[in-house]
Image: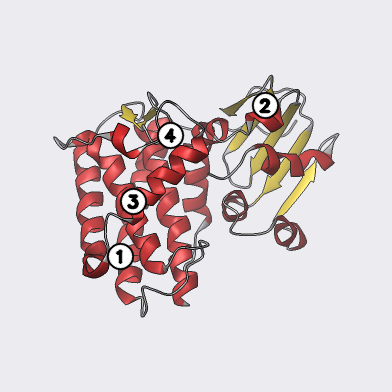
Amino acid sequence: MGTVTTFDPVAEHERTRAALRAVVPRLVRLLREVPDPDAPSGVPLWTVGDVGAHLAGVYFAYSVDFTDESVEWDSLLPPGDGPLGERIAAMNATSVGLFSGEERARLGDFITERSAMFLRVTEGLAPDTPVSAPWLGKELTLTLAAATGLMLSESLVHGLDIARGAGRPWPIGPAEASLVLGQSMPTMMPLALDTAKARGVSIAFDLAIKGGPRLGVVIDGGTATVTRDAPPRTYDCRITATPTTFLLVSFRRMPVWKAIASGRMRAGGRRPWLAMRLGELIATP
């Protein structure tokens, strides 16, 4: 069955906060050093400047719960509680438009200010403090731990998109990637399930990230559950990967074949061929 590890939610949340605090200056420096903000980025149809504007929108969205600012989310998002992809697409379009023209020269300052404010006002709050996230679901709330992990995820992955467009290096360390996987994946993977493709599917994945975390991903009855340190059970497929590799594959920044060919991802268990189904069933918004 493999070794099941345990984690301290408070300690891991503090490490995630520290990682977010550390990545922001690196991200801001990258934005300020970009020679051409209109250059293509690692995101199709988005320029480097578009990605920077989107990141500014991310920092605004996740921090607004802790300010006295008011946002009319219903006017920015599709009506009702539609599919996650539609809500994310609408939010992305809004975020890219928040800064335009000469305003984009202020992206670094805005991200610096918002990140500092978020970390300051959330200091000492419990990891399970609720944070509203209507762009993911009309009445959806996240835990503060998940929100912090998602901010770190956005910063790392979109930092890579900017760096690729600017021709700059952007290393993502295994410790940073592990924190993203442990803090945000248990929340985001069920939300990103393609319910149409999952209809009639019953598969249990043992996702073993080298150095942690360990996630039990069970897709059954058109829903997905993701459990940290799941009790021992029989899994259909075990996926073993290094943290950075799984992060990049999950966000379609690295092809699966490259991860496998390099030896940084492999499948095992009694039905290893099912590994490819995970990426088909759980989409990247």
Q: Amino acid at mark 4?
A: Leu
Disc on res. 136:
4
Q: Secondary structure at mark 2?
A: strand
> Hey, which quadrant is residue 91 in on the image?
top left
Horizontal and vertical percent for residue 256?
A: 71, 55
Q: Amino acid at mark 3?
A: Ser
The crowd level at tag 4 (other Cα within 10 Å; few <14, some 14-19, many 20+) is many
Horizontal and vertical percent for residue 12?
A: 42, 38
Q: Is residue 272 left or right of residue 33?
A: right
Single out the mark in the foreground, 3 or 1. 3
Q: Give how far apart the Cα atoms at labels 1 and 4 are.
A: 26 Å
Q: Is residue 104 left or right of residue 152?
A: left
Front residue of 128/219: it is 219
Q: Amino acid at mark 1?
A: Val
> Hey, which quadrant is residue 248 in on the image?
bottom right
Q: Answer whether residue 122 is visible to the viewer in this image.
A: no
Q: Give how far apart the Cα atoms at labels 2 and 1 are.
A: 38 Å
Disc on res. 218:
2
Q: Secondary structure at mark 3?
A: helix
Residue at the (31%, 26%) spot, across then down = 129
Disc on res. 28:
1
Q: Secondary structure at mark 4?
A: loop
Single out the mark in the foreground, 1 or 4. 4
The crowd level at tag 2 (other Cα within 10 Å; few <14, some 14-19, many 20+) is some
Q: Give how far apart the Cα atoms at labels 2 and 3 are.
A: 33 Å
Q: Are marks 2 and 1 in contact (CB under 8 Å)?
A: no
The tag earlier along the polypeptide, 4 or 3, is 3
Q: Amino acid at mark 2?
A: Val
Horizontal and vertical percent for residue 103?
A: 22, 65
Q: Give how far apart the Cα atoms at labels 4 and 2 are.
A: 21 Å
Front residue of 44/29: it is 44
Q: Residue furthest bottom?
A: 35
